Image (spheres, rainbow, N blue to C red):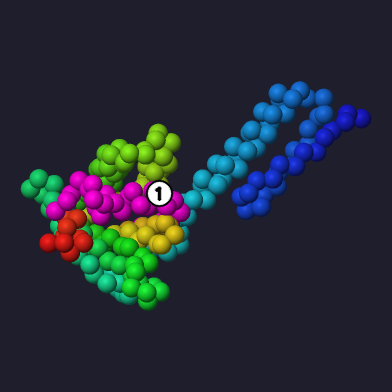
Amino acid sequence: MVPVTVIKLSFNHKSEVIELIINSTLSKTILAALCLVCMSIVIEQAKADEVKVISGEQSSIAQENITQAYLNDASLVGRGVLKIYWAKVYTLSYYTIDENGDGAPDVKALHYEYLRHVPKDATLDASREEFLRYPDITDAKMDQWMAYLDQALADMNEGDEAIIMRQGDGTITFHVSNYPKVVIKDAEFSAVFMNIWLGVDTTYPDLRKQLLALM
């Protein structure tokens, strides 16, 4: 009988335990390679779990009720229109929700009301350019963040709406007209994404002032 060794590898991801039954005559190099393969599988699963697509629930509910559905308890801070040269792209509104009643915003929300057709690819390209301005961006972060947006965004037509909500723990939820809700648990990504419009270094300072009621 060929002797075998049972090796248990424990990872802090949903308390998973992987068991490998390995021929004890294998070299240490091969054994190490097998361990690395198993670790990579768990890591990839963890990354996949960061994005939750709720396909059974349409974010729009009813097109005319999207604001009521998700912003019923929100307070409007400010509103403006994004313009690219002469073209009006969308009306953007900034809301906050004080869930704890302590006067501090627990949820920050951006509400987009589209004034023209905007292809998904155009939004992805613009987002990539914004991410490149982030001082701590890396190739790995860029790939992951663009993968998030590829799942969360859609082609938008005149009259379509989207609501993007960031929770206090950094979770961000994308509600897009006639598209499944997408929840992303990545605090750094969500902070950088919201700061495209709200951050002090925004590309759109006049719009930021309108959103924050600074003008």
- Give the answer, above or below, for where 207 lies relative to 2: below
Q: Quadrant of residue 167?
A: bottom left
The structure residue drawn at horizontal position 35% and vertical position 52%, both measured from the top left corner, is 191
Residue named by callout 1: 188
Three-letter amino acid code of the residue under disc 1: Glu
- The verdict on residue 179 being magenta is yes
Residue 147 left/right relative to 28 = left
Near mark 1 (Cα within 10 A), the count class, few <14, some 14-19 or many ≥20, is few
Task: Residue 59 in the image: state x and y as whole percent.
Answer: 36, 63
Residue 46 left/right relative to 164 = right
State whether residue 75 appears in this view: yes
Q: Quadrant of residue 138?
A: top left
The structure residue drawn at horizontal position 22% and vertical position 48%, both measured from the top left corner, is 202
Is label 1 in a helix, a strand or a loop? helix
The structure residue drawn at horizontal position 28% and vertical position 69%, both measured from the top left corner, is 67
The structure residue drawn at horizontal position 37% and vertical position 42%, both measured from the top left corner, is 146
Residue 80 left/right relative to 42 = left
**Which stretch appears magenta?**
177-206
State whether residue 153 appears in this view: no
Task: Residue 51 in the image: state x and y as whole percent.
Answer: 46, 51
Residue 10 left/right relative to 195 = right
Of residues 193 and 59, the one nearer the viewer is 193
Task: Residue 89 in the image: state x and y as whole percent.
Answer: 16, 52
Of residues 82 and 102, the one nearer the viewer is 102
Task: Residue 44 in the image: state x and y as whole percent.
Answer: 55, 41
Number of numbered tags placed on the structure image? 1
Q: Quadrant of the C terminus?
A: bottom left
